[in-house]
Image (cartoon, rainbow, N blue to C red):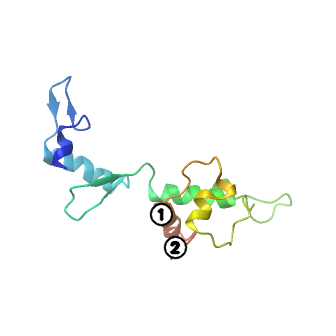
Amino acid sequence: MVDALDTELFRNATLGRHLKLKDAMEVLEGMVAEGGGEWADKEKTTIIVLWRKHEEWGNLIYDWVCGPQGGGTTANGEGQIDATGQKGSVLTLYEIEHGDLTVGQGELLTLAGLEGSADSGQSFTV
C-alpha cells in the first residue's frame, strides 16, 4: 500500500498534492465497505479493486441463464424464459466461460459472480 502512495492514484502532480497513508486507507476502506474492493491480505497491504460488485456479477450470470431481469413470461404468459437452455443444469466454470453460448460475451464470469448469485439464492458453488 505504501508503494501506491507515490502513484497518480493518490498524487496530483499538477496541484502538487498527495494523500497521506491514513487518508488513502480511508478511501480504500470506503471502497471495501461499498463492495468496490476487497483486501487481498489480512495486513491490508494489497487491495483488489472490483470492476463489478459480486452481486452484479451474480445478476449478470443469472440474466445470462434466464434472460434479463430473471426471465419473463412465455408467449402464453406463464413461467420464465430460459434464455440459454441452461436453467437447472450443472455447468463447470470452463463451460460457462468458454462454451458455445458465451462466444463473444467477453469475460462473463468470475468466481465472485458465482458467489454473488449464491448469496442471493440463485445458484450455489461447491
The extreme top residue here reads: 14
Q: Residues within 10 Å of mark 1 (few under 14, many from 20)?
A: few
Q: Classify mark 1: helix, strand or loop.
A: helix
Q: Classify mark 2: helix, strand or loop.
A: loop
Residue visible at 58% across and 58% down? 97
The extreme right residue here reads: 76
Tell me whether circle 1 and circle 2 mark residues in contact (CB < 8 Å). Answer: yes
Taking the image as shown, residue 26 lies to the left or right of residue 68, namely left
Q: Which residue is under mark 1?
A: 111
Amino acid carrying label 2: it is Thr
Taking the image as shown, residue 119 lies to the left or right of residue 84, namely left
Image position, residue 24 (x, y; %):
20, 45
Of 80 and 37, the residue lying toward us: 37
Of 113 and 102, the residue lying toward us: 102
Of 108 and 29, the residue lying toward us: 108
Amino acid carrying label 1: it is Leu
Image position, residue 31 (x, y; %):
32, 50
Q: Residues within 10 Å of mark 2 (few under 14, many from 20)?
A: few
| Earlier sequence position, callout 1 versus callout 2 | 1
The extreme bottom residue here reads: 126
Residue 4, above or below 61:
above
Q: Which residue is under mark 2?
A: 125
Q: State which quadrant residue 20 falls in.
A: top left
Image position, residue 82 (x, y; %):
73, 62
Residue visible at 18% across and 24% down? 15
Residue visible at 61% across and 61% down? 96
The label number, if any, that marks residue 85 in the structure image: none
